[in-house]
Amino acid sequence: MHEHPLILIYLTLMAIATAITAAVATRVQVLPDVIDLTLIPTGSGLASLTLVTYGAVRRFEPERIGRLSLLGTLVGGGATTATILIALMADVLS
């Protein structure tokens, strides 16, 4: 992680903004009191593991397997987040 102070200040402010948004959303009942988002890291991990296994079976070099791991984490997290948002929208709109 970069050690530039402005980046750390920005990240701190974004964490505070996220906490305030979650508190307000829970208070006005936009979101339920208990929000289970453990599916996102699980989806990220499974996609990453799948791509790393694929790379190992195909005998890719270690640097490429590392990139596959990062790609799997990104794609898995994004796909899981999109699935959760679609499910929430379908539940809210129905």
Image (cartoon, rainbow, N blue to C red):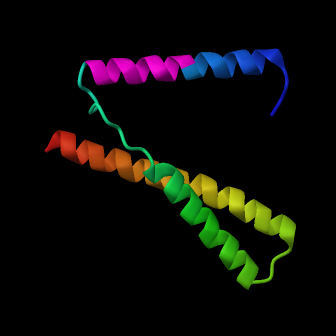
**Left or right: where 19 falls relative to 48:** left
Residue in the image at 38% along x and 53% along y: 83
Q: Determine the image quadrant of residue 94.
A: top left
Q: Position of residue 13 (x, y in %)?
A: 61, 15
Residue in the image at 20% along x and 45% along y: 91
Tell whether position 77 is magenta. no
Q: Residue furthest left?
A: 94
Q: Position of residue 5 (x, y in %)?
A: 81, 16
Residue in the image at 68% along x and 18% along y: 10
Above or below, comparing residue 52 to residue 5 in the picture = below
Q: Position of residue 28 (x, y in %)?
A: 25, 19
Looking at the magenta stretch, what is its main secondary structure? helix
- Numbered label tally: 0
**Left or right: where 68 falls relative to 83:** right
Q: Determine the image quadrant of residue 35.
A: top left
Above or below, comparing residue 20 to residue 76 in the picture = above
Q: Position of residue 68 (x, y in %)?
A: 71, 64
Tell whether position 17 is magenta. yes
Residue in the image at 51% along x and 17% along y: 17
**Left or right: where 81 falls relative to 14:** left
Range shown magenta? 16-27
Q: Quadrant of the N terminus?
A: top right
